Image (tube, rainbow, N blue to C red):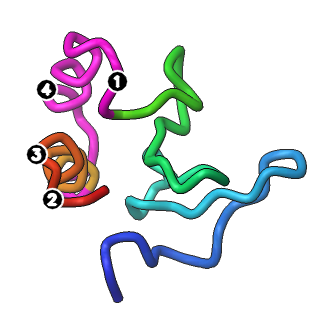
Amino acid sequence: TGLSDFGEGLHHGRVRTIRIDPLGKLVRNEHGTIVWNFGMHAGKSVTQTDPGFVKWVLNKDFPEATKMILRKVLEGELV
């Protein structure tokens, strides 16, 4: 199972997204872009998000798997 293979997708209305992390906090949208799936940045590209929000996520009580995947996205290892 690859990092982007956590399940067969979630349905939000008629848009199908693919979970990138186990809890679905990061998803791949219909265009293939990794975006946030919660909070005020929901639907926005992870790589184009305010760095303060990213730092907040990394310092909060999110699962280590989510944080690891977020770091990989930001470092360009997962696109």
Image vertical order of residue 26 relative to residue 51, above or below: below
Q: Quadrant of the N terminus?
A: bottom left
Query: Where does label 3 land, which residue?
Result: 75
Disc 4: which residue: 59
Q: Amino acid at mark 1?
A: Gln
Segment colored magenta: 47-65
Q: Earlier in the sequence, mark 4 or mark 3?
A: 4
- The dot on residue 6 is none
Name which residue lies at 51% across and 27% down. 44
Query: Of the residues shown, which amino acid type is indicated by label 4?
Result: Asn
SS for dot 4? helix
Residues tagged 1 and 4 counted as in contact (Cβ below 8 A): no
In the drawing, does residue 55 fall left or right of residue 20?
A: left
- Distance from disc 3 to disc 2, alpha carbons, whole Å, reads 6 Å
Task: Indicate the quadrant containing the C terminus: top left, top right, bottom left or bottom right.
Answer: bottom left
Q: Which residue carries the number 2 mark?
A: 77
Task: Mark 2 or mark 4: name the one nearer the start of the chain.
Answer: 4
Instruction: Give the distance between the C-alpha atoms of the residues marked 1 and 4, in whole angstroms.
Output: 19 Å
* Relative height, residue 24 to residue 5 (above, below): above
Among numbered discs 3 and 1, the one appearing first in the sequence: 1
How would you rate the neighbour count of disc 1 (Cα within 10 Å): few for under 14, some for 14-19, many for 20 or more? few
Please, what secondary structure does the residue beneath circle 1 have? helix
Front residue of this view, candidates 66 and 32: 32
- Of label 1 and label 4, which has the lower sequence position? 1
Q: Residue at x 13, y 26 (%)?
A: 59
- 16 relative position to 32: left or right: right
Which residue bears the numbered disc 1? 48
